[in-house]
Amino acid sequence: MYRAHSKDINRNKSFHPLTYRNLSRVEQLKENAELDKAKAVERQKELQRDQEERRYDELVLANSADSLSGELARYRQTRSIFAAEYEADAKSAKGAPVTSPQSPQASKQEVQLGSSTGASFPITSFLGKFKREEVDGPVCATVKAETRDATTTAPAASATVSADAETSVRKRPRDDVNSSSTSSAQNGSANAPATGFVTSSEAAQLRKELNLVQKQRHDPLMRVKQYQNSCVAAAARQQHHEQETCAEAKHVSNDKNMLQSRIRELLALRKKK
């Protein structure tokens, strides 16, 4: 009637989980999970290493004002920030090498920076954006040296060349700088800088002072002292208020005694009359 002999008894059962297809899928999932875990561990190590380098660079920048270690620390920070730009510059340099006319001092300094930091990205035109002022300095020095050497042959020509070089390097001053310098000269502080530049040593000193203030503010002993001082101040205010009230009460009682004595005197005079 129901043809039970011809029905598949396993028609409602799921297939075994470890057949070839499902086994390969499970293995693939395990491999993907292991890869994700390895990537997460590697990323964590990279972040920890970057954090340690950043802390070390901050310590170096705080302890060194303008030394070579400070320059290297600044270079590492800019390299970590602009890693994508360095990669793009490296790819473009591999495709078409570009030679930029720079002074030998600047090139030696860049080579020294790259070799000492062990940078994986070369120093290219992107870093030159941050090194323009440093490159202008040695170029100006070389121009001045050439003009000094040429003074023996042609003094008039050397004077004109040096004047042209100085005018080309010299920048137009800002109006607020001129006004601030004139005001400082009028106030008697002409030697004080009129810019908002803060050196790394001053920044480190300010950071130390700020840390000291924060530690003193969060120090439990300082809080206990503040609480004790507040309690003493409250007790002193209360005592002063009590003294004032006592003095007022004494003054009122003295007035009452004077009035009573005067009344007695008047009554005594009336009785005599």
Image (cartoon, helix red, strand yellow):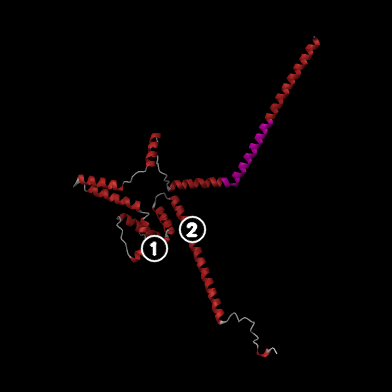
What's the magenta bit mostly, secondary-structure-wise? helix
Regarding mark 1 in the picture, which secondary structure is present there? helix
Q: Is residue 87 above or below residue 246?
A: below
Q: Residue at x 57, y 82 (%)?
A: 19
The quadrant of the picture occupied by the N terminus is: bottom right
Q: Quadrant of residue 176?
A: top left
Type of amino acid at the residue the image marks with label 1: Ala
**Residue at mark 1:** 88
Q: Quadrant of residue 113?
A: bottom left
Q: Residue at x 63, y 39 (%)?
A: 230
Which of discs 2 and 1 lies nearer the camera? The answer is: 1
- On the image, the x and y values in percent for residue 185 come to 38, 36
Q: Is residue 77 above or below residue 202?
A: below
Please check the rendered image and state whether residue 19 is part of the magenta-colored stretch, yes or no.
Answer: no
Please check the rendered image and state whether residue 222 is part of the magenta-colored stretch, yes or no.
Answer: yes
Q: Earlier in the sequence, mark 2 or mark 1?
A: 2
Left or right of 12? Residue 172 is left
Query: How much space separates mark 2 and mark 1, taking CA atoms?
Result: 24 Å
- On the image, the x and y values in percent for residue 106 come to 33, 55
Regarding mark 2 in the picture, which secondary structure is present there? helix
Decide which of 214, 181 is in the foreground and name it.
Answer: 181
* Residues in magenta, as a range: 217-242
Check the image and name the residue furthest to the top.
Answer: 273
